[in-house]
Amino acid sequence: MKILFLTLIVPYPPDAGPRIKTWHVLKYLAEQGYSITLITFVRKEEEKYLPYLKGVCEKVISVPIRRTKIRDVLSLMSSQLRGTPFLIERDFRPAMMQAIKKLLVEETFNVIHIDQVNMAQFILKRNSLYISSKTIFDAHNATWAILERMRSQVPLFIRPLVSQEAKKLKKFEHRLVQEFDHVLTVTDIDRDLLLENPNDPSLLSKLHVLPIAVNTQEIQPVMRKKGSQQILTIGSLNYPPNADGIRWFLREVFPLIKKINGKATLTIIGKNPPKDFYHLAAPFGEDIQIKGYVEDLTPHLENSALMVVPVLAGGGMRVRILEAFARGIPAVTTTIGLEGIAANNGMDVLVENDPISFAKAVLNLLDQPAQQQTLAENARKLVTSLYDWKVVLKELDRIYQI
């Protein structure tokens, strides 16, 4: 079976949620014997990773993309004039459209697999070239709902624009559900949010929930340092919901923790930390370390007592939590942070939503090594049984054969 696979980002290295998900899908399909032609946007810093993809893909085609503020402004203007979502206008490139059309003229594919909403615009069924191929739209999550949740976190003067963008994306995503043969989401919540009419059986039958998965054979528990008072948080900080959640923890939660436990420290790991993080961290001196991107997480995991995943907005699943579970790191998160993960509060993870309760949960966990170990062991069992990539992706075989 020949597959044309479209991605917005180079799905390697598997160091962030979307990359982890897509990398495992590609690896799984390759192991099942599918012939994959990958066409992906590539940023300059990603070019060095393209050779790794040739280990799982028969052919890799890359199209350069570079976002700039000027281009973003022009895309926003175009979005306003045409009534289309900004996120879609921003990532349209004629070179990508031409490359895909050329492939579809020259070759026949059994399946076209579109990864993330930004790429769907290149495979809308306006052209007979696409009719012979089964189309699968891997939405990951309902993007419009992420914007809705973010609205309360942005300045007042921006909120009308965010609301408008959410409405346009909602309409666009509902259209994609109508057009494509199958649609994948990572949670039941996202599946329901993508349905314009939840009672339409023809639409329900084409939506499938495939959770994000991790490789629990490769990702093994670490030996955590006894008596550690280090709190760890990890996230792609150029993704606004991740940055907003950590900003909330810095501003409202960590000061409460330090008042009770003067030995507590915080390490923040993630690409492109916002400048205001450093201002928020300054009063705490060396007790807050902002590391940026790191190649190897293992030393930081070994030195930590626990991980916090403070999420106030967003959608889909938090891979950070699944990887913490797989690594044997006890975790504290919010209700939104745990969405899509079948973990039990108090047994596998701790869940709190307001600053005082979140701080208390962290303080209690720092003070109780036995509870840390119980959470870590339970969470490891959970992720191995429910979220290992080979367990989850068996469903993909069935969908490809429908």
Image: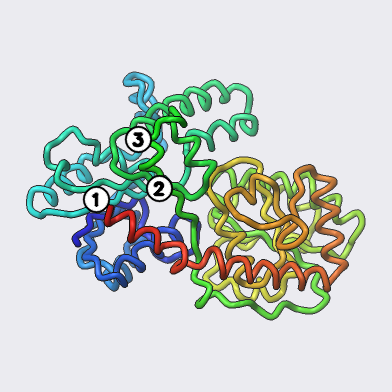
In the image, is residue 256 above or below residue 367? Answer: above
Q: Secondary structure at mark 1?
A: strand
Q: Secondary structure at mark 2?
A: strand
Residue 39 x/y as whole percent: 25, 55
Q: Residue at 49% across / 71% down in the picture?
A: 215
Q: Specify which label sits upstream in the sequence, 2 or 3.
A: 2
Sequence order check: which comes first, mark 1 or mark 2? 1
Task: Tell me what residue is drawn at x 64 percent, y 49 percent.
Answer: 337
Q: Quadrant of residue 121?
A: top left
Give how far apart the Cα atoms at labels 1 and 3 are.
21 Å
Asked whether residue 273 is in view, the answer is yes
Residue 184: assigned label: 2
The percent coordinates of residue 191 (x first, y second) are 47, 41
Q: Nearer the viewer, residue 319 or 385?
A: 385
Residue 149 position, x and y percent, is 59, 34
Q: Residues within 10 Å of mark 1 (few under 14, many from 20)?
A: many
Q: Give the residue number, with chain letter if any, for mark 3.
A: 202
Amino acid under disc 3: Ser
Q: Give the side of residue 260 with respect to residue 91, left or right.
A: right
Q: Mark 1 = which residue?
A: 112
